[in-house]
Image (spheres, rainbow, N blue to C red):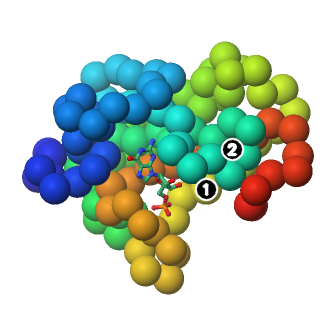
Amino acid sequence: MSADPHCIFCKIVAGQIPAKKVYEDEDILAFHDIHPWAPVHILIIPKLHIASMVDAGLQHQALLGKMMAVSPQLMRELGVTNGYRHVMNTGADGRQEVPHVHLHVMGGPRPWLKG
Ligand code: 5GP
Ligand code: ZN
């Protein structure tokens, strides 16, 4: 399934729900998290609906690699100069809340709300 009509992040990809976008290309989208844990907290998602990393495989290598590889450029553009965290939550025990793969990238001066 390339998009799930009930998925909140697919709706952001489709422009049906607004988001503060920081990057977009044909494969991926990055936007600010609505409840940031850190001064800068973005989510990088594939445009393709993949519910969680449980459903990912080697066929998604380029897509997942792109999400990780674009993150330094985005954090530089957002003025983060002292390091950041990448987090990806998977499934119930991973405390994943939104069932569409997303990479959290968090940075900025501490203290942070969480993490
Ligand atoms: P998870 O717990 O699934 O790894 O993280 C989901 C993240 O998505 C949370 O940090 C939450 O604040 C964020 N989020 C949930 N709904 C929305 C939304 O509608 N817009 C934006 N920008 N972020 C959202
Ligand atoms: Zn989705």
Instruction: Say which residue appears at 84% left-offset and 26% top-offset.
Output: 81
Residue that lies at the very extreme toward the bottom in this rendered image: 93
Residue picked out by circle 1: 87
Q: How many marks?
A: 2
Q: Position of residue 111 (x, y in %)?
A: 88, 50
The residue type indicated by label 1 comes to Val
Quadrant in the picture for the C terminus: bottom right
Q: Residue furthest top?
A: 77
The amino acid beneath tag 2 is Met
Residue under circle 2?
106
Looking at this view, is 39 or 63 the one in front? 39
- Residue at image point 76% right, 21% down: 79
**Relative to residue 65, is residue 15 depicted above or below?**
above
Q: Residues within 10 Å of mark 2 (few under 14, many from 20)?
A: many
Q: Which of disc 2 and disc 1 is earlier in sequence?
A: 1
Q: Is residue 6 above or below residue 94?
A: above
Residue 58 appears in the figure: no
Rendered location of residue 98, percent (x, y): 37, 61
Residue 96 visible within the image: yes
Q: Residue at x 28, y 50 (%)?
A: 8
